Image (spheres, rainbow, N blue to C red):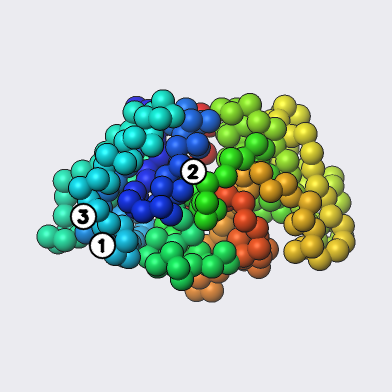
Amino acid sequence: MDTQLFHIFRNTPTGRETFLQSIYFCTLMGVAPVVYVPKHTKFLMYFEKDVVQVDLDGSYLTAPETAEKHARALAEAEGLDPGFYKPKNFTASTLPDIPVDFDFMCCPRSISDLTSKIGLGHIGSRVRRIIQSAHFPVLITSPSFRKWNSVTVFFGGSTNAVNALHLGFRIARKTGMKVRLFTQVEGSRTRDDYEKVIKENGLGDDMERYVDDWLLFFGGKFEENLYEVPHDSLLLLGAYGHGLIRDILFGSKMETIQSVMPNNLMVAGPNYVDRGA
């Protein structure tokens, strides 16, 4: 089975920008796009430990008679043959069930609010729920299409950071791009401490092969240090999710990243499974 990215298509100018980002990712990664053109503003995703109801705003139903045509034309212009998902199962007559066996999913920062209400620092609650539950990583796009030429992994040594590093090496293998690490050193930890975590997780060889820069900050404000991250880099982050507050927030550093960085983000949640290819 082909590696697949799931995309909910919105037939609007902003929806076009989001889909162009999916197309770019698919082209670089050799991934097949699977496009869902919604006919209803709600759908369900049945994850192993959670059922997520996604509530779309009305703009996702714009001009349904041209939506598939527009999506197909955008993909074919880049040499891709998109698949179109048609729901077969419904929990209710207007509540289709969407499968969750994809390898990637693309979302704007929010999939349930009008674009005019979305600020850079807002990731919608439904997107957060998907990230927390999915085995696949979620690509969260910038407001307008922008190419990325490198990969930056935010690595703090935790389990979720190791997930992000696995994902970074996965992307490096497919694209040939080099990986950059960004670490805000905490407490009395040293570079050796972080390298030990990497080696203990069997990633030492990949570090040698793919990483060409490691931004280690032993001081300074985290938000100010983010200036050193190139604007044309895909940012990879790991999200954790246990406990009431952590189900709502991703952690202070991740909240800062997603609120101030205009880059495209890809987030691996706590249930992310590294498939290697």
Looking at the rendered structure, the kind of residue marked 2 is Gln
Q: Secondary structure at mark 3?
A: loop
Q: Secondary structure at mark 2?
A: helix
Q: Residue at x 26, y 57 (%)?
A: 61
257 above or below 104?
Answer: below
Furthest toward the bottom, the residue is 245
Tell me if residue 95 comes above or below residue 164 in the rendering.
Answer: below
Q: Measuring 12% from the left and 60% from the top, which residue is drawn there? A: 93
- Compared with 6, 128 (above or below) is below
User: Residue placed at 57% from the left, 64% from the top?
Assistant: 120
Rendered-image quadrant of the N terminus:
top left
Q: Is residue 57 left or right of residue 187?
A: left
Is residue 250 toward the left or the right of residue 18 in the image?
right
Looking at the rendered image, the disc whose residue lies closer to the viewer, 2 or 1, is: 2
Residue 268 visible to the viewer: no
Give the residue number, with chain letter if any, for mark 3.
39
Q: Secondary structure at mark 1?
A: loop
Give me the disc on residue 136.
none
Any mark on residue 41, and which?
1
Disc 2 target residue? 21
